[in-house]
Image (tube, rainbow, N blue to C red):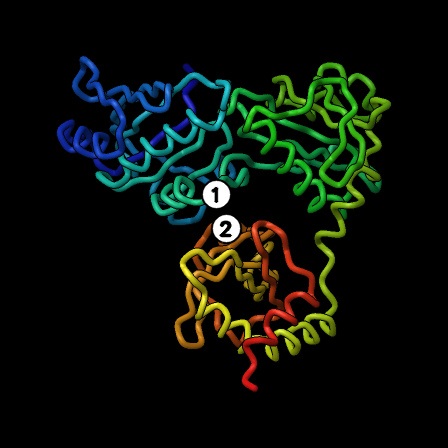
Amino acid sequence: MKEVYLVAIESAVPVAPEALLASFETEEMAFVLAPDGQGFTLEAEETRVEVVFESRPTPREWTSDLFSGSEPALEALGRARAFYRLAFETGSAQPTVPVFVALMCARVLLTHATGVLVDITSSKVHEADDVAEITELDFDIRDHVNLHAVEVIEGETPLWVHSHGMAKFGARDLEIFHLGEQDLLPAEAFLHELCTDLAFGQGPPLRTQMGTSEGQPFMLVPSDEARTNLLGVPLDAFEGHEGLYLTVVSPQGRHNTAELLRPFRERFLQEPTERTESMHEESQSLLPAFKARFLRRGLMEPLTFLVRAPFETHPESGDATEQLWLEVLSWDDATIVGRLVDGAVHTTEWRKGAHVEVPEADVNALALSREGRTLEDEEVRVLLQAERPS
Protein backbone atom coordinates (compact mmCIF):
# COMPACT_ATOMS: atom_id res chain seq x y z
CA MET A 1 0.00 0.00 0.00
CA LYS A 2 1.30 3.45 -0.91
CA GLU A 3 0.02 6.55 0.86
CA VAL A 4 -0.97 8.92 -1.94
CA TYR A 5 -3.52 11.42 -0.64
CA LEU A 6 -4.36 13.37 2.50
CA VAL A 7 -7.79 14.81 3.10
CA ALA A 8 -7.09 17.70 5.48
CA ILE A 9 -10.20 18.82 7.37
CA GLU A 10 -10.88 21.73 9.72
CA SER A 11 -12.77 19.56 12.21
CA ALA A 12 -10.76 17.75 14.88
CA VAL A 13 -13.18 14.81 14.93
CA PRO A 14 -13.90 12.25 12.19
CA VAL A 15 -17.05 12.19 10.11
CA ALA A 16 -19.76 9.99 11.64
CA PRO A 17 -19.48 6.44 10.22
CA GLU A 18 -23.22 6.32 9.54
CA ALA A 19 -22.98 9.35 7.25
CA LEU A 20 -20.05 7.84 5.35
CA LEU A 21 -21.73 4.47 5.01
CA ALA A 22 -24.82 6.06 3.45
CA SER A 23 -22.71 8.07 0.98
CA PHE A 24 -20.47 5.19 -0.08
CA GLU A 25 -23.44 2.89 -0.55
CA THR A 26 -24.85 5.47 -2.96
CA GLU A 27 -21.52 5.45 -4.86
CA GLU A 28 -21.64 1.61 -4.91
CA MET A 29 -18.48 1.22 -2.85
CA ALA A 30 -18.04 -1.43 -0.16
CA PHE A 31 -17.39 0.36 3.16
CA VAL A 32 -15.83 -1.41 6.16
CA LEU A 33 -15.20 0.51 9.38
CA ALA A 34 -11.76 0.03 10.96
CA PRO A 35 -11.46 -1.43 14.50
CA ASP A 36 -10.64 2.03 15.88
CA GLY A 37 -14.03 3.28 14.67
CA GLN A 38 -12.42 6.19 12.83
CA GLY A 39 -10.65 4.84 9.77
CA PHE A 40 -12.17 2.55 7.14
CA THR A 41 -11.48 0.61 3.97
CA LEU A 42 -13.22 0.90 0.60
CA GLU A 43 -13.48 -1.60 -2.20
CA ALA A 44 -14.63 -0.74 -5.70
CA GLU A 45 -13.55 -1.59 -9.26
CA GLU A 46 -11.33 -4.39 -7.85
CA THR A 47 -9.44 -1.74 -5.87
CA ARG A 48 -8.95 -1.47 -2.11
CA VAL A 49 -8.34 1.91 -0.48
CA GLU A 50 -7.27 2.04 3.17
CA VAL A 51 -8.15 5.21 5.07
CA VAL A 52 -6.61 6.15 8.42
CA PHE A 53 -7.83 9.07 10.55
CA GLU A 54 -5.23 11.15 12.37
CA SER A 55 -5.91 14.15 14.61
CA ARG A 56 -3.61 17.15 14.46
CA PRO A 57 -3.68 19.10 17.73
CA THR A 58 -1.76 22.14 16.46
CA PRO A 59 -2.31 23.44 12.94
CA ARG A 60 0.89 24.57 11.22
CA GLU A 61 1.77 27.00 8.48
CA TRP A 62 1.94 25.59 4.95
CA THR A 63 3.57 27.69 2.25
CA SER A 64 3.55 27.61 -1.53
CA ASP A 65 7.20 26.49 -1.60
CA LEU A 66 6.05 23.17 -0.12
CA PHE A 67 2.82 22.74 -2.08
CA SER A 68 1.25 24.19 -5.20
CA GLY A 69 -2.35 25.27 -5.06
CA SER A 70 -4.62 28.28 -4.83
CA GLU A 71 -4.21 30.68 -1.94
CA PRO A 72 -7.57 29.60 -0.39
CA ALA A 73 -6.49 25.94 -0.64
CA LEU A 74 -3.18 26.58 1.10
CA GLU A 75 -4.94 28.62 3.80
CA ALA A 76 -7.42 25.79 4.35
CA LEU A 77 -4.54 23.33 4.67
CA GLY A 78 -3.02 25.54 7.35
CA ARG A 79 -6.28 25.46 9.33
CA ALA A 80 -6.58 21.68 9.22
CA ARG A 81 -7.07 19.95 12.57
CA ALA A 82 -7.14 16.37 11.26
CA PHE A 83 -6.17 14.20 8.30
CA TYR A 84 -7.59 11.23 6.52
CA ARG A 85 -4.65 9.32 4.99
CA LEU A 86 -5.55 7.41 1.81
CA ALA A 87 -3.37 4.52 0.63
CA PHE A 88 -3.75 1.94 -2.15
CA GLU A 89 -1.75 -0.48 -4.27
CA THR A 90 -0.31 1.30 -7.30
CA GLY A 91 0.65 -0.10 -10.68
CA SER A 92 -2.42 -2.20 -11.44
CA ALA A 93 -3.25 -3.34 -14.97
CA GLN A 94 -5.20 -0.10 -15.36
CA PRO A 95 -3.25 2.36 -13.16
CA THR A 96 -5.84 5.14 -13.28
CA VAL A 97 -8.56 3.02 -11.64
CA PRO A 98 -7.23 3.01 -8.04
CA VAL A 99 -6.47 6.72 -8.40
CA PHE A 100 -10.06 7.39 -9.43
CA VAL A 101 -11.47 5.29 -6.58
CA ALA A 102 -9.30 7.13 -4.05
CA LEU A 103 -10.38 10.48 -5.50
CA MET A 104 -14.04 9.47 -5.20
CA CYS A 105 -13.34 8.58 -1.58
CA ALA A 106 -11.82 12.02 -1.01
CA ARG A 107 -14.76 13.66 -2.77
CA VAL A 108 -17.23 11.97 -0.43
CA LEU A 109 -15.19 12.95 2.65
CA LEU A 110 -15.13 16.57 1.49
CA THR A 111 -18.93 16.62 1.18
CA HIS A 112 -19.13 15.86 4.91
CA ALA A 113 -16.24 17.98 6.20
CA THR A 114 -14.70 21.30 5.19
CA GLY A 115 -11.19 20.79 3.91
CA VAL A 116 -8.87 20.16 0.98
CA LEU A 117 -7.16 17.25 -0.74
CA VAL A 118 -3.37 16.98 -0.71
CA ASP A 119 -1.67 14.91 -3.40
CA ILE A 120 1.50 13.76 -1.65
CA THR A 121 3.14 12.47 -4.83
CA SER A 122 2.86 15.75 -6.74
CA SER A 123 2.67 18.21 -3.80
CA LYS A 124 -0.60 19.61 -5.16
CA VAL A 125 -3.45 20.92 -2.99
CA HIS A 126 -6.97 20.70 -4.44
CA GLU A 127 -10.10 22.45 -3.22
CA ALA A 128 -13.29 20.38 -2.92
CA ASP A 129 -14.72 21.79 -6.17
CA ASP A 130 -11.52 20.81 -7.97
CA VAL A 131 -11.85 17.22 -6.74
CA ALA A 132 -15.43 17.10 -8.03
CA GLU A 133 -14.31 18.31 -11.46
CA ILE A 134 -11.41 15.87 -11.61
CA THR A 135 -13.77 12.94 -10.98
CA GLU A 136 -16.48 14.17 -13.34
CA LEU A 137 -14.63 15.46 -16.40
CA ASP A 138 -12.24 13.87 -18.87
CA PHE A 139 -8.87 12.76 -17.53
CA ASP A 140 -6.28 15.56 -17.55
CA ILE A 141 -2.76 14.61 -16.47
CA ARG A 142 -2.16 18.18 -15.28
CA ASP A 143 -4.42 17.46 -12.31
CA HIS A 144 -2.05 14.72 -11.19
CA VAL A 145 1.52 15.84 -11.89
CA ASN A 146 3.73 18.87 -11.36
CA LEU A 147 6.46 19.79 -13.80
CA HIS A 148 9.51 21.58 -12.39
CA ALA A 149 12.18 23.42 -14.37
CA VAL A 150 15.56 23.77 -12.64
CA GLU A 151 18.63 25.59 -13.97
CA VAL A 152 21.49 23.12 -13.50
CA ILE A 153 24.18 24.42 -15.88
CA GLU A 154 25.16 27.66 -17.58
CA GLY A 155 24.55 28.54 -21.19
CA GLU A 156 21.61 28.78 -23.57
CA THR A 157 20.09 25.42 -22.58
CA PRO A 158 20.51 25.23 -18.77
CA LEU A 159 17.19 23.69 -17.78
CA TRP A 160 16.38 20.28 -16.37
CA VAL A 161 12.60 19.66 -16.52
CA HIS A 162 11.16 16.82 -14.48
CA SER A 163 7.80 15.60 -13.21
CA HIS A 164 6.41 14.76 -9.77
CA GLY A 165 3.28 12.69 -9.24
CA MET A 166 3.63 9.60 -11.43
CA ALA A 167 4.22 7.35 -8.41
CA LYS A 168 0.45 7.21 -7.82
CA PHE A 169 0.18 5.36 -11.12
CA GLY A 170 2.97 2.96 -10.21
CA ALA A 171 5.28 4.64 -12.74
CA ARG A 172 8.55 6.54 -12.55
CA ASP A 173 8.61 10.28 -13.05
CA LEU A 174 10.07 11.69 -16.26
CA GLU A 175 12.94 14.08 -16.91
CA ILE A 176 14.58 15.82 -19.84
CA PHE A 177 17.79 17.90 -19.94
CA HIS A 178 19.45 20.73 -21.84
CA LEU A 179 16.40 22.88 -22.50
CA GLY A 180 16.15 26.64 -22.96
CA GLU A 181 13.34 29.00 -21.95
CA GLN A 182 11.86 28.70 -25.43
CA ASP A 183 11.57 24.94 -24.91
CA LEU A 184 9.48 25.03 -21.74
CA LEU A 185 5.98 25.06 -23.23
CA PRO A 186 6.82 22.48 -25.94
CA ALA A 187 8.47 20.28 -23.28
CA GLU A 188 5.36 20.56 -21.10
CA ALA A 189 3.15 19.46 -23.97
CA PHE A 190 5.39 16.50 -24.80
CA LEU A 191 5.89 15.37 -21.19
CA HIS A 192 2.18 15.66 -20.44
CA GLU A 193 1.42 13.38 -23.40
CA LEU A 194 4.04 10.89 -22.26
CA CYS A 195 2.86 11.00 -18.64
CA THR A 196 -0.70 10.36 -19.83
CA ASP A 197 0.43 7.24 -21.70
CA LEU A 198 2.28 6.00 -18.62
CA ALA A 199 -0.72 6.74 -16.38
CA PHE A 200 -2.84 4.43 -18.53
CA GLY A 201 -0.17 1.73 -18.54
CA GLN A 202 0.66 2.38 -22.19
CA GLY A 203 4.15 3.85 -21.86
CA PRO A 204 6.90 2.96 -24.36
CA PRO A 205 9.33 0.14 -23.54
CA LEU A 206 12.72 1.19 -22.19
CA ARG A 207 15.75 1.65 -24.46
CA THR A 208 13.54 1.32 -27.54
CA GLN A 209 13.19 3.96 -30.22
CA MET A 210 9.67 5.36 -30.27
CA GLY A 211 7.94 8.28 -31.95
CA THR A 212 6.15 11.23 -30.37
CA SER A 213 2.61 12.13 -31.43
CA GLU A 214 4.32 14.40 -33.97
CA GLY A 215 6.55 11.58 -35.27
CA GLN A 216 9.88 12.64 -33.77
CA PRO A 217 12.06 9.71 -32.50
CA PHE A 218 13.16 9.39 -28.87
CA MET A 219 13.99 6.80 -26.20
CA LEU A 220 13.29 6.40 -22.49
CA VAL A 221 16.27 5.31 -20.42
CA PRO A 222 16.50 4.81 -16.62
CA SER A 223 18.06 7.89 -15.06
CA ASP A 224 20.92 5.99 -13.43
CA GLU A 225 22.10 5.18 -16.94
CA ALA A 226 21.18 8.42 -18.70
CA ARG A 227 22.75 10.77 -16.18
CA THR A 228 26.20 9.20 -16.54
CA ASN A 229 26.87 11.11 -19.77
CA LEU A 230 25.59 14.47 -18.53
CA LEU A 231 28.44 16.96 -18.73
CA GLY A 232 28.83 19.83 -16.31
CA VAL A 233 25.82 19.03 -14.11
CA PRO A 234 26.87 19.00 -10.41
CA LEU A 235 25.71 16.01 -8.39
CA ASP A 236 24.13 18.25 -5.73
CA ALA A 237 21.63 19.38 -8.39
CA PHE A 238 19.84 16.07 -7.80
CA GLU A 239 19.56 16.45 -4.04
CA GLY A 240 16.03 15.39 -3.10
CA HIS A 241 15.64 13.72 -6.49
CA GLU A 242 17.71 10.61 -5.90
CA GLY A 243 14.93 8.22 -6.87
CA LEU A 244 14.93 6.61 -10.30
CA TYR A 245 13.45 8.64 -13.13
CA LEU A 246 12.89 7.86 -16.79
CA THR A 247 15.05 10.15 -18.90
CA VAL A 248 14.06 11.29 -22.39
CA VAL A 249 17.02 11.05 -24.77
CA SER A 250 17.67 10.86 -28.50
CA PRO A 251 17.68 7.43 -30.22
CA GLN A 252 21.47 7.53 -29.85
CA GLY A 253 21.16 8.01 -26.08
CA ARG A 254 22.20 11.66 -26.17
CA HIS A 255 20.62 14.61 -24.39
CA ASN A 256 20.19 16.77 -27.51
CA THR A 257 16.40 16.92 -27.62
CA ALA A 258 15.81 20.31 -29.27
CA GLU A 259 14.76 18.68 -32.58
CA LEU A 260 12.42 16.35 -30.67
CA LEU A 261 10.44 19.34 -29.38
CA ARG A 262 10.42 21.36 -32.61
CA PRO A 263 6.93 20.24 -33.80
CA PHE A 264 5.46 20.95 -30.36
CA ARG A 265 6.50 24.61 -30.62
CA GLU A 266 4.00 25.09 -33.43
CA ARG A 267 1.14 24.45 -31.01
CA PHE A 268 1.99 27.64 -29.17
CA LEU A 269 2.25 29.93 -32.18
CA GLN A 270 -0.43 32.62 -32.08
CA GLU A 271 -2.88 32.57 -34.96
CA PRO A 272 -2.44 35.79 -36.97
CA THR A 273 -5.07 38.34 -35.99
CA GLU A 274 -6.00 38.89 -39.63
CA ARG A 275 -6.79 35.19 -40.05
CA THR A 276 -8.89 35.06 -36.87
CA GLU A 277 -10.86 38.13 -38.00
CA SER A 278 -11.40 36.65 -41.46
CA MET A 279 -12.60 33.34 -39.98
CA HIS A 280 -14.90 35.23 -37.60
CA GLU A 281 -16.48 37.15 -40.45
CA GLU A 282 -17.05 34.01 -42.55
CA SER A 283 -18.41 32.02 -39.58
CA GLN A 284 -20.86 34.74 -38.64
CA SER A 285 -22.21 34.78 -42.19
CA LEU A 286 -22.85 31.02 -42.02
CA LEU A 287 -24.07 31.00 -38.43
CA PRO A 288 -27.81 31.59 -39.09
CA ALA A 289 -27.98 28.55 -41.40
CA PHE A 290 -25.80 26.52 -39.02
CA LYS A 291 -28.12 27.43 -36.13
CA ALA A 292 -31.25 26.63 -38.13
CA ARG A 293 -29.87 23.20 -39.07
CA PHE A 294 -28.96 22.50 -35.44
CA LEU A 295 -32.41 23.51 -34.13
CA ARG A 296 -34.19 21.12 -36.48
CA ARG A 297 -31.91 18.14 -35.80
CA GLY A 298 -33.64 14.83 -35.09
CA LEU A 299 -33.26 12.47 -32.14
CA MET A 300 -31.11 10.14 -34.25
CA GLU A 301 -29.21 13.00 -35.84
CA PRO A 302 -25.94 11.71 -37.35
CA LEU A 303 -24.38 15.19 -37.39
CA THR A 304 -22.23 16.66 -34.62
CA PHE A 305 -22.17 20.46 -34.49
CA LEU A 306 -18.93 22.17 -33.42
CA VAL A 307 -18.01 25.83 -32.98
CA ARG A 308 -14.81 27.61 -31.98
CA ALA A 309 -14.65 30.65 -29.70
CA PRO A 310 -12.02 32.57 -27.69
CA PHE A 311 -11.51 31.80 -24.00
CA GLU A 312 -9.44 33.95 -21.65
CA THR A 313 -6.59 32.23 -19.81
CA HIS A 314 -3.96 33.53 -17.45
CA PRO A 315 -0.48 32.15 -18.16
CA GLU A 316 1.98 33.53 -15.60
CA SER A 317 -0.51 36.16 -14.36
CA GLY A 318 -0.87 37.71 -17.80
CA ASP A 319 -4.10 37.63 -19.78
CA ALA A 320 -4.10 35.54 -22.94
CA THR A 321 -6.71 34.08 -25.26
CA GLU A 322 -7.01 30.53 -26.52
CA GLN A 323 -9.29 29.42 -29.33
CA LEU A 324 -11.16 26.31 -28.16
CA TRP A 325 -13.65 24.02 -29.90
CA LEU A 326 -16.89 22.93 -28.26
CA GLU A 327 -19.63 20.56 -29.27
CA VAL A 328 -22.97 22.38 -29.36
CA LEU A 329 -25.46 20.84 -26.92
CA SER A 330 -28.17 23.49 -26.92
CA TRP A 331 -28.86 26.99 -28.20
CA ASP A 332 -30.53 29.47 -25.86
CA ASP A 333 -31.41 32.58 -27.87
CA ALA A 334 -28.00 34.10 -28.65
CA THR A 335 -26.05 31.86 -26.23
CA ILE A 336 -24.52 28.54 -27.17
CA VAL A 337 -24.23 25.85 -24.49
CA GLY A 338 -21.62 23.24 -25.28
CA ARG A 339 -18.98 20.78 -24.10
CA LEU A 340 -15.31 21.53 -24.69
CA VAL A 341 -13.75 18.96 -27.00
CA ASP A 342 -10.25 20.23 -26.28
CA GLY A 343 -8.81 21.78 -23.15
CA ALA A 344 -6.87 25.00 -22.77
CA VAL A 345 -3.10 24.67 -23.08
CA HIS A 346 -2.23 27.27 -20.46
CA THR A 347 -4.68 26.37 -17.72
CA THR A 348 -6.98 23.65 -16.42
CA GLU A 349 -9.68 26.27 -15.85
CA TRP A 350 -11.11 25.39 -19.27
CA ARG A 351 -10.97 21.62 -19.20
CA LYS A 352 -11.79 19.11 -21.90
CA GLY A 353 -15.33 17.89 -21.24
CA ALA A 354 -16.39 20.98 -19.29
CA HIS A 355 -19.77 22.53 -20.05
CA VAL A 356 -19.46 26.15 -21.14
CA GLU A 357 -21.58 28.99 -22.51
CA VAL A 358 -20.44 31.34 -25.26
CA PRO A 359 -22.22 34.23 -27.04
CA GLU A 360 -22.91 33.27 -30.63
CA ALA A 361 -21.31 36.59 -31.64
CA ASP A 362 -17.94 35.22 -30.44
CA VAL A 363 -17.97 32.19 -32.74
CA ASN A 364 -15.08 32.37 -35.21
CA ALA A 365 -15.14 28.89 -36.76
CA LEU A 366 -17.73 26.22 -37.53
CA ALA A 367 -17.47 22.50 -38.19
CA LEU A 368 -19.75 19.55 -38.78
CA SER A 369 -18.91 15.89 -38.46
CA ARG A 370 -20.87 12.82 -39.48
CA GLU A 371 -20.17 9.51 -37.75
CA GLY A 372 -16.74 10.66 -36.67
CA ARG A 373 -15.65 12.20 -39.99
CA THR A 374 -15.22 15.96 -40.15
CA LEU A 375 -16.91 17.36 -43.26
CA GLU A 376 -14.85 19.37 -45.72
CA ASP A 377 -15.55 23.11 -45.93
CA GLU A 378 -17.36 22.75 -49.26
CA GLU A 379 -19.53 19.92 -47.87
CA VAL A 380 -20.52 22.17 -44.96
CA ARG A 381 -21.44 25.03 -47.29
CA VAL A 382 -23.57 22.77 -49.49
CA LEU A 383 -25.36 21.28 -46.48
CA LEU A 384 -26.06 24.69 -44.94
CA GLN A 385 -27.19 26.17 -48.23
CA ALA A 386 -30.44 24.21 -47.83
CA GLU A 387 -31.18 26.16 -44.65
CA ARG A 388 -31.07 29.56 -46.35
CA PRO A 389 -34.45 31.12 -47.13
CA SER A 390 -35.28 31.07 -50.84
User: Which residue lies under the disc numbered 2?
Assistant: 351
The amino acid type, in three-letter code, at marker 2 is Arg
Position in image of residue 135 (x %, y %): 39, 39
CB atoms of marks 2 and 1 within 8 Å: yes
Q: Earlier in the sequence, mark 2 or mark 1?
A: 1
Where is the C terminus found, in terms of image quarters? bottom right
Location of residue 43 with respect to 140 vertically, above or below: above
Left-right relation of 350 to 50? right
Position in image of residue 69 (x %, y %): 46, 43
Which image quarter: residue 230? top right
Tell me the CA gap for discs 2 and 1: 8 Å
Which image quarter: residue 42? top left
Residue pushed farthest right?
252
Position in image of residue 103 (x %, y %): 38, 33
| Residue located at (80% from left, 44% from top) | 262
Location of residue 325 with respect to 275 vertically, above or below: above
Residue 136 visible in image:
yes
Left-right relation of 74 to 8? right
The amino acid type, in three-letter code, at marker 1 is Asp
> Which structural element holds mark 2?
loop
| Residue located at (77% from left, 41% from top) | 261
Left-right relation of 49 to 235? left
Position in image of residue 243 (x %, y %): 61, 17
| Residue located at (47% from left, 56% from top) | 339
Location of residue 246 with respect to 347 vertically, above or below: above
Where is the N terminus found, in terms of image quarters? top left
| Residue located at (39% from left, 72% from top) | 332
Left-right relation of 70 to 256? left
User: Which residue lies under the disc numbered 1?
Assistant: 138
Residue 231 visible in image:
no
- In the foreground, 29 or 381: 381
